[in-house]
Image (cartoon, rainbow, N blue to C red):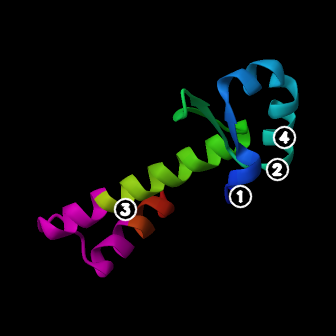
Amino acid sequence: MQRLRIDQDIRSMSEFRTGIASFLKQVHDTKRPLIITQHGKGAAVLLDVGEYEAMQEKLELLQDIQTSISQIENGEGVTHKDAREMILSRAAK
């Protein structure tokens, strides 16, 4: 995801309502999120679908890594030798 440009990527709800098509195009073209404000405070974020999906994949990977770290800390890990043998035996089937 591209870095947010404060002067271009933060819009009020009233601006968003009147220019929704142009803001959708902006988000799609720039791959940057659009922050929508209401009463001067952040209310919503508009993201390109592809950028959202990529963000979800990264989040899932980070959660998997955290789960792995927790398992290792709890003694639930597998040695490299055992993991290699498990993979090779599955591949041979």
| CA distance for labels 3 and 4 | 34 Å
| CA distance for labels 1 and 3 | 24 Å
Check residue 26 in the rendering and tell me which mark sits there, or answer none: 4
| CA distance for labels 2 and 3 | 30 Å
| CA distance for labels 4 and 2 | 6 Å
Q: Amino acid at mark 4?
A: Gln
Q: Position of residue 72 (x, y in %)?
A: 20, 69
- Asked if the residues shown at circle 1 and circle 2 are in contact, with their CB atoms under 8 angstroms apart, the answer is yes
Of callouts 1 and 2, the N-terminal one: 1
Q: Which residue is under mark 3?
A: 65
Q: Amino acid at mark 1?
A: Gln
| CA distance for labels 4 and 1 | 12 Å
Q: Which residue is under mark 1?
A: 2
Above or below residue 23? Residue 5 is below
- Residue at 55% over, 34% down: 40
Q: Position of residue 10 (x, y in %)?
A: 67, 42
Q: In front of the other: label 1 or label 3?
A: 1
Above or below residue 76? Residue 80 is below
- Asked if the residues shown at circle 3 and circle 4 are in contact, with their CB atoms under 8 angstroms apart, the answer is no
